[in-house]
């Protein structure tokens, strides 16, 4: 084991030394030359519709609202219908704290999910249209446990934070200030799921059973309706001739 560790250290040292001698301009040129792979075919001409349609096809629930008051109303309706109560847990994100919770009669507790909590609410930093994914960055604003332990996970997304591809979202992240670097970056693409040896899917076995994504956009309701249509087209079986 010691010999293996010594060999590994030697390799890492050579890589570090080589990197120090490299011209930053040459590194940038090589990275630029790599280029980007072909994009997946978009589900719709509007990235927001593509995003919500993929959320639906990932066994999530997708809604569109016009503003933050609409988002709170959507959360309140969802929680009341499922549990007959108004309690939710939210991270200490300033955007969540600023929501008009009282308009929907909601009782948020800001902090970390505890045993017995049914619903957690997060605010995504970014979203990826081509995969129907949301991106969370760990911290006091967004505790990792809030997206893993509650039975129902609700995520808010601003329209401006939806990107076409993973590469676009990642480039946006690396362009951010170095003042804050999360210990964990989560890319979530649906409720918790697992499969047995026969490939029978089970949802909620190791995390949230339900996943609701709420897109906040001026034309949010129209985008959500278009996404329903786009998702239905994909779900429809293809007739064999």
Image: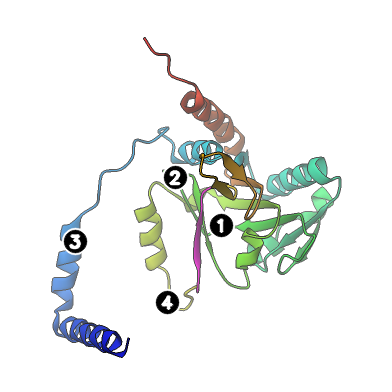
Nearer the N terminus, badge 1 or badge 3?
Answer: 3
Whether residue 50 can be seen here: yes
Label 3 to label 4: alpha-carbon separation: 22 Å
The answer to whether marks 4 and 1 mark residues whose Cβ atoms lie closer than 8 Å is no
Residue under the image location 41 percent in, 64 percent down: 173
Nearer the N terminus, badge 4 or badge 2?
Answer: 2
Please tell me whether mark 1 sits on a helix, a strand or a loop.
loop
Please tell me whether mark 4 sits on a helix, a strand or a loop.
loop
**In the drawing, what numbered circle is on residue 178?**
4
The answer to whether marks 1 and 3 mark residues whose Cβ atoms lie closer than 8 Å is no
Residue toward you, 112 or 180: 112
The answer to whether marks 1 and 2 mark residues whose Cβ atoms lie closer than 8 Å is no
Q: What x and y, as percent, mark residue 229?
A: 53, 26
Q: What residue does disc 3 label? A: 32
Q: What x and y, as percent, mark residue 168?
A: 36, 54
Nearer the N terminus, badge 2 or badge 3?
Answer: 3
Q: In the picture shown, does residue 193 fall above or below 23?
A: above
Please report the bounds of the magenta region as a residue range.
Answer: 183-189
**In the drawing, what numbered circle is on residue 124?**
1
Label 2 to label 3: alpha-carbon separation: 24 Å
Label 4 to label 2: alpha-carbon separation: 27 Å
Q: Quadrant of the C terminus?
A: top left
Alpha-carbon neighbours of circle 3 within 10 Å: few (<14), some, or many (≥20)? few
Is label 1 or label 2 in front? 2
Nearer the N terminus, badge 3 or badge 4?
Answer: 3
Residue under the image location 20 percent in, 81 percent down: 15
Magenta highlight on residue 36: no
Label 4 to label 1: alpha-carbon separation: 19 Å
Q: What residue does disc 2 label? A: 131
């Amino acid at each position: 084991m010691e010999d293996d560790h010594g060999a590994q250290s030697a390799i890492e040292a050579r890589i570090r030394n080589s990197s120090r001698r490299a011209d930053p301009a040459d590194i940038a040129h090589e990275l630029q030359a790599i280029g980007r792979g072909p994009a997946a075919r978009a589900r719709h001409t509007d990235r927001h519709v593509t995003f919500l349609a993929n959320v639906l096809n990932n066994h999530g629930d997708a809604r569109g609202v016009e503003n933050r008051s609409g988002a709170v109303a959507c959360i309140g309706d969802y929680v009341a219908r499922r549990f007959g109560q108004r309690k939710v847990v939210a991270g200490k994100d300033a955007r969540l704290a600023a929501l008009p919770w009282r308009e929907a009669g909601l009782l948020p507790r800001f902090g970390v999910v505890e045993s017995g909590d049914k619903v957690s609410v997060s605010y995504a930093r970014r979203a990826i249209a081509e995969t129907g994914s949301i991106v969370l960055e760990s911290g006091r604003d967004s505790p990792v446990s809030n997206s893993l332990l509650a039975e129902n996970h609700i995520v808010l997304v601003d329209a401006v934070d939806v990107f076409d591809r993973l590469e676009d979202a990642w480039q946006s992240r690396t362009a951010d200030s170095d003042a804050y670097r999360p210990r964990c970056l989560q890319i979530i693409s649906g409720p918790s799921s697992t499969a047995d040896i026969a490939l029978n899917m089970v949802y909620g076995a190791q995390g949230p059973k339900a996943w609701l994504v709420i897109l906040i956009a001026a034309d949010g309701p129209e985008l959500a309706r278009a996404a329903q249509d786009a998702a239905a087209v994909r779900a429809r079986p293809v007739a064999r001739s």
